[in-house]
Amino acid sequence: MNTLQITTQDHVAIIALDNGSSNTINAEMLAELKKIITSVEADDNMRGVILTGKKGFFSAGLDLITLYDYDEKQIKKFWIDFLDLVKTLTLFKKPMIAAISGHSPAGGCVLSICCDYRVMAEGKYVIGLNEVPVGIIVPDNIFELYAFWIGKAAAYRNLLEGKLMGFEEAKNIGLVDATTPIESLMTVAQKKMANYIQFDAITWQESKLNMRKELNAKVSQDQSATLEKMLKQWWSPSTRSILKTIIGNLQAKKV
């Protein structure tokens, strides 16, 4: 796989995002993530997944530089695939832990909140959903997923201002469950996974599905109407201007 590094330890798949220095999410990563998650779920020998990134970046979110040049057909397919991956990750019945190895804004945060448990590296890293300032309409299922962890009122306030926060605040509001120095990040994640998989697999998985029943139903709802609004706004002059500015800043940092 070109955007992921995959290893297996004690019947657990460790999936490390590996797409450039900041692990941006592109169409290839969406396809590869869905393929490996679907494979692990179907494999009775695999007990769970730890999703991580690289030091400094779990994922910086969507690959805006590439997406900006997509035509209407390409960008529609990308958003359909992105929302489908969110559904796949959320409905995954086995334990899934996010070892957040650095910055995790926007799409990176979305990947992490699909998981059952999040441990975040301590440092000057940010996490949160900043879609609104970027000019992207927040879809219903992302709100429901965010609210599942931090409550609807907090999710509502945070989303409308596109709030990003450090590891301490993220832990205080329940967006992440634990924090640790980067050196012990995987150790903490693996210990939590060991705690989960010590139990009978069917009992654990069916309990997870029961407790996520309402969430799973919400993320499985038809998003067509919201998607049409998102796509319309994507092509609006205001959003294109915001994206162009962001891309210019990103490209300037690479020089």
Image (tube, grey):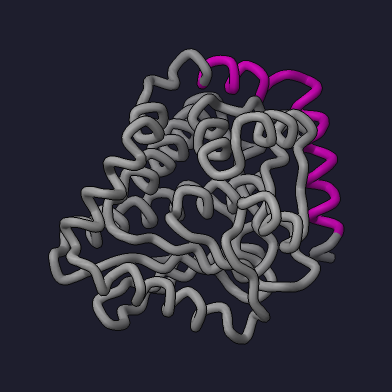
User: At 69% from the left edge and 35% from the top edge, which residue is drawn?
Assistant: 154
Quadrant location of residue 229?
Answer: top right
The boundaries of the magenta stretch are 227-252
Seen as rendered, the residue at the extreme left is 44
Position of residue 225 relative to residue 10, above or below, is above
**Residue 63 rendering spot, x and y as whole percentages:** 62, 49
The quarter of the rendered structure image containing the N terminus is bottom left
Q: Is residue 26 left or right of residue 62?
A: left
Q: Is residue 83 visible?
A: yes
Q: Is residue 20 visible?
A: no
- Check residue 229 for magenta coloring: yes
**Residue 56 rendering spot, x and y as whole percentages:** 69, 71
Position of residue 126 relative to residue 231, above or below, is below
Quadrant location of residue 176?
Answer: bottom right
Q: Is residue 70 left or right of residue 50?
A: right
Q: How many marks?
A: 0
Position of residue 153 relative to residue 123, above or below, is above
- Check residue 57 for magenta coloring: no
Tell which of 254 and 187 is nearer to you. Answer: 187
**Residue 7 rendering spot, x and y as whole percentages:** 35, 78
Main secondary-structure element of the magenta-colored stretch:
helix
**Residue 73 rendering spot, x and y as whole percentages:** 48, 26
Seen as rendered, the residue at the extreme bottom is 183
User: At 52% from the left edge and 18% from the top edge, which residue is drawn?
Assistant: 226
Quadrant location of residue 253?
Answer: bottom right
User: At 38% from the left edge and 60% from the top edge, which residue is drawn?
Assistant: 96
User: At 35% from the left edge and 73% from the top edge, which residue is drawn?
Assistant: 195
